[in-house]
Amino acid sequence: MATIHRTTMSPTKLELLADWLPKQSWYLGSAASPELVKAGGFRLDDPDGVVGIEFMVVVDAAPQEPVAYLVPLSYRGQRMEGAPGRALIGTSEHGVLGTRWIYDGVHDPVAMAQLRALLRGEATAQQQSESDTPDPTVTVQGTGPDDGLSVQVNRVLRPTGATQTPSLGLVAGWTWSDGTAARGVFANVTPR
């Protein structure tokens, strides 16, 4: 199980994301420098204990209407072989683990394999800030992907009601910058 270290990161994850996020095609803000706040998410464990995996929700409070973004993150102790250039979010100095290469998790095969395992019921979502603590608020609707299904991570999150949950997908929550709780579809599973 992954251990959550109470330490520093320089630059912080939010600082890295504030630089990276506006460069993404799915970014909805107009500001080149978003006002990001951590708003939720969960972790998954790498069975080999090498890659840190976090599905982080950040809210950009800069626009008139706040926008919630889902950014799957993977943390590695060295560069990921064969990763496309756009996959690297940046590097950070971790107070315990040293230099960490932080990747956009949709480009990390370990992160995506664990997301698929979660959707199949073969992995358990973990609390974002507590070691070895399952997060029961992360739910899977339907049964998970097999070879005939594909997984799409929803980068811009929209609150959904009970009648809008997917027939097959991942649902979890976050908190808006005003403190209001929301739930939405983090990932959809569809036929290929």
Image (cartoon, rainbow, N blue to C red):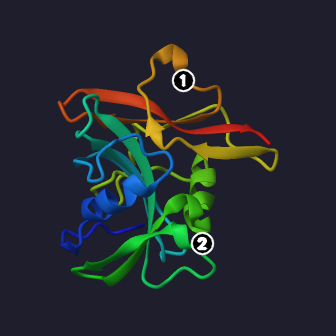
Residue 158, image x, y percentages: 43, 29
Mark 1 = which residue? 165
Mark 1 or 2 closer to N-term? 2
Between the C-alphas of marks 1 and 2, the distance is: 33 Å
> Going by the image, does 1 lie left or right of 145?
left
Quarter of the image with the C terminus in it: top right
- Image-quadrant location for residue 40: top left
Where residue 97 sits, quadrant-wise, is bottom left
* Residue 46 screen position, x and y as percent: 51, 67
Q: Position of residue 85 (x, y in %)?
A: 55, 73
Give the labeled residue for mark 2: 84
> Which amino acid is tagged 2?
Pro
Q: Residues within 10 Å of mark 2 (few under 14, many from 20)?
A: few
In the picture, the quarter occupied by the N terminus is bottom left
98 versus 4 height, above or below: below
At 18% from the left edge and 73% from the top edge, which residue is drawn? 8
- The residue sitting at 22% across, 75% down in the picture is 10
- Front one among 63 and 175: 63
